Amino acid sequence: MRLSRRILFVFAALALLPLLGIFVTALLAWATGCEVSESGAAPCIVFDTDIGGLLSAMLTAGWFALLTIPLLMLLVGLWSLVEAYVWGRQRRRTRRADKRALATQPRAEPDKSAASGV
């Protein structure tokens, strides 16, 4: 199950990337004093380079989160069902093995001297 957890982590990170893009865009716009909107690129000059188009594209790409977040929730739900099934299966196997081990152990005979009062 370790591999499935790693795969789920990778998918979760990919699903949350659009939100990260929005946060980075907001942080860059705040730090540079630029205005960012989805309607179009506004001029934003940083180190003699206009990054207004990039900021606008990153902000607009955040709408992709409307698709990725529900898919992530579905994936986590399916993963939790599989994880619960595997956990229950391992638990049943352990119980069966414990019962078999107890059944194969020789039973201790009662001490006859203690029963007779000697």
Image (tube, rainbow, N blue to C red):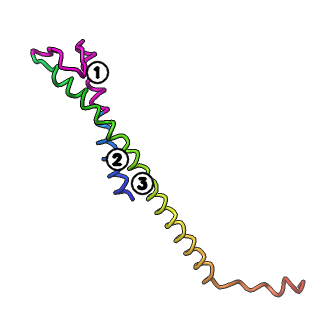
Q: Which residue is mark 1?
A: 27
Single out the residue that lies furthest toward the front.
Answer: 39
Q: Which residue is mark 3?
A: 78
Q: Is residue 18 above or below residue 115?
A: above
The answer to which quarter of the image holds residue 39 is top left
As measured in the structure, the alpha-carbon distance from the residue carrying label 3 to the one carrying label 2 is: 14 Å
* Quadrant of the snapshot with the C terminus: bottom right
Discs 3/2, front:
3
The answer to which quarter of the image holds residue 59 is top left
Please, what is the three-letter code of the amino acid marked with disc 1? Leu
Q: Is residue 117 above or below residue 58?
A: below
Instruction: Residue 54: give x, y in percent of width and height.
Output: 17, 25
- In this rendering, the count of numbered labels is 3
Marks 1 and 2, the one that precedes in the sequence: 2
Callout 1: helix, strand or loop?
A: helix
Marks 3 and 1 close (CB-CB < 8 Å): no
Q: Which residue is mark 2?
A: 9
**Magenta segment: does it hold 20?**
yes
Marks 3 and 1, the one that precedes in the sequence: 1
Please, what is the three-letter code of the amino acid marked with disc 2? Phe
